[in-house]
Image (spheres, rainbow, N blue to C red):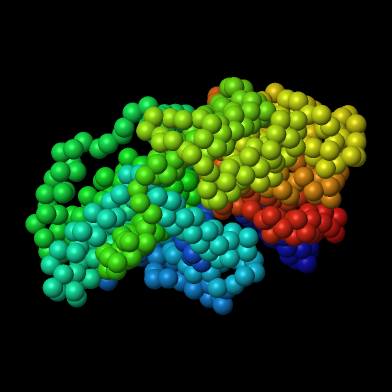
Amino acid sequence: MEFQKKDNNSSLLFLLIIFNIQKMKKRFLTLSLLSILISGSILSQVLTPVQWTFYLEASGAEEVDLVFEASIDETWHLYSLDIPAGGPIPTSFVFVESDNYERIGEVVEVSEADRVYDSSFDMELGMFSDKAVFKQKIKVLSQDNFRIEGYVEFMSCDDERCLPPSEEDFSFSINANTGSKSTKSGLLGFFLFAMLMGFVGILTPCVFPMIPMTVAFFSQGTENRTKAILKAFVFGFSIMFIYTAVGLIVSLTSAGADFANNLSTHWIPNLIFFTLFMVFAASFLGLFEMVLPSSIVNKADQQADKGGYIAAIFMGLTTVLVSFSCTGPIVGALLVEAASGDILRPTVGMFGFGLAFAIPFTLFAIFPSWLNKLPKSGGWLNSIKVVLGFIVLAFGMKFLLTIDLIYHLDIFSREVYLAIWIVIFTMMGFYLLGKIKFSHDSDLPHIGFFRAMLVIAVFVFVVYLIPGLFGAPLNAVSGLIPPMEKQSFRINKASSVQESAPVFSFSEKSDKCEDAKYSDFLHLPYDLDGYYDYEQGMKCARELNKPVFLDFKGHACSNCKEMESKVWSDPEVLKRLRENFVIIALYVDDRTKLPEEEWVQSKADGKIKKTIGKVNADLQISMFEMNSQPYYVIVDHNGEELVEPMSYNLNVKEYIDFLDRGLDAFHE
């Protein structure tokens, strides 16, 4: 009996234990659910008020700027690089060291930080709101492709709270084709071209007659030969300084891709440049004389009359001002070309022009006896002015062509544009033969050797242009004339593209790919099929199981047209593009406005992109940290690079190898 009671007590105890365990399980389950809910709530409130974008900007020979751009949410701020000890964590950049590059100086703040007193730290702190841009200049040491990697550490706060320090990894892809070698050769070529233009400027009728006047000025007080030579050098350096200063001003005011793009593609600056070139051409051809206001020239000339080194400087200024009526279009063309490239080009170009322009004046000032060997001023100077007028007339048409291509006005077909050029240069040839005369021209009793050689060169050029009326590629001038797809008439379409194989079409290969958007006004050369919208092209590539060939290009991009004319026209290149890839041609300067549902918010600057060109340009920067064209990228169906991208490269074998490596990587 006692045993039984004890047993009942034990059973009761067992039941109580079981009940408590179940209760604990429910409580544990409840706590677990609460923990999950709380954790989810916390995670949903993770704040990221600062978003980073990284991209490259060409800086100069062998130099590149790494750009770090922070977009900061409203009410938040980011601390600057320079924060006093005892303050919050400053923004800082850490780089993975490499032998492929060398940092030039430290990271600098391009944006100006606000100086704000912070009572929490009892000190004045540098802060950025809305946007902050930092740059690190590097020198490229390698001829191979490589990446620059590291991370940025930063801290952000608003008026009520601060977030703990965060780190954001960055990576820049340095392409050998856009790195030190091409940058260096591009700037060197532009410098030499600018020097050539400087020497041409010397031979204009506004400038050449000034050489004896300059020599007479520096021959005064010849009893002190050393002083006269020093004054001549000051004179020469002042000319170089003036032209270089103009280039430097353009460089400083044209920094950034938006300025270059707007200058080279917007209809307003292109129409202004076209008008100015036509005005200069009319002046050179004798319609009127173009001179600067006499008050400006007289003031500079009065200072030059006072003597001494200051007078030499003002003599240089007077020379530049007087010569402008002839050198204006040359200088203008150089600045337009320079401003549409990297920001160093205007300074380099104007320095080259000023150097070449100053050398003859300086040398004749130092060695006045050489003046006797110069040809006398005469009708030949006016002939140079008229020839320059024809050239300015022809090349000024390029600005109208840019408007026509970018805004799809369809004013100029390729053959119409070539016909205008053929007429202009034919008239120039007959003028040099003496068959056409303009005002101020003297009689031409006979043709000398150099004039005869120039006549031959002009007519050879005209004969070279004529086959272009019927579809010949004209590779030598492909960057200056409308692209092949603007050719409305061809005698033999196959021969014009150096390809006799049948034209491939997506519709022949598969019925899954839809018609390309924008194909009514955007086209690829050589009857290539492709797409002009990134998402649509990627969709087709997945359906056809082909790699994607991204072609970042521009209507106003001369190098793009030259690549297509000299490289894409090769049968082996054309065969690979046609058969092995889905081509997506992305025009970065097209100004066609998109419907509102297709507008894109930029990942780079946070602005809304509303045109085809701006969307494509933002895509190139955000995906590949590059804003120059042409730029060719072979990617898989996820948009990942299969091989290192390629830019301007006229080596056909290297281009074929680039395409083959991309195809092999896709099938691996």
The picture places residue 66, in percent across and down from the top left corner, at: 48, 60
Q: Residue at x 47, y 67 (%)?
A: 138
323 lies left or right of 577: left
- Does any portion of residue 1 appear in the rendered image? yes
Q: Position of residue 121 (x, y in %)?
A: 24, 62
- Where residue 462 sits in the image (x, y, percent)? 64, 37
Residue in the picture at 44% in, 57% down: 195
Q: Nearer the viewer, residue 93 or 265?
A: 265
Count of marks overlaid on the render: 0
Left or right of 625: which side holds 109? left
The residue closer to the viewer here, 452 or 637, is 452
Identified at 87% across, 30% down, the residue is: 507
Does residue 118 appear in this view?
no
Name the quarter where the N terminus is drawn: bottom right
> Where residue 173 appears, x then y in whole percent?
60, 61
Q: State the residue lying farthest toward the bottom.
A: 99
Write the residue at 64% across / 25% down: 416
Q: Is residue 504 above or below residue 228?
A: above
Instruction: Kindly give the residue lying farthest to the front in the view shown.
Output: 445
Whether 648 is drawn above or below 263: the answer is: below
Q: Vertical placement of 558 versus 10: above or below? A: above
The quadrant the C terminus occupies is: bottom right
Residues 666 and 3: in front is 666
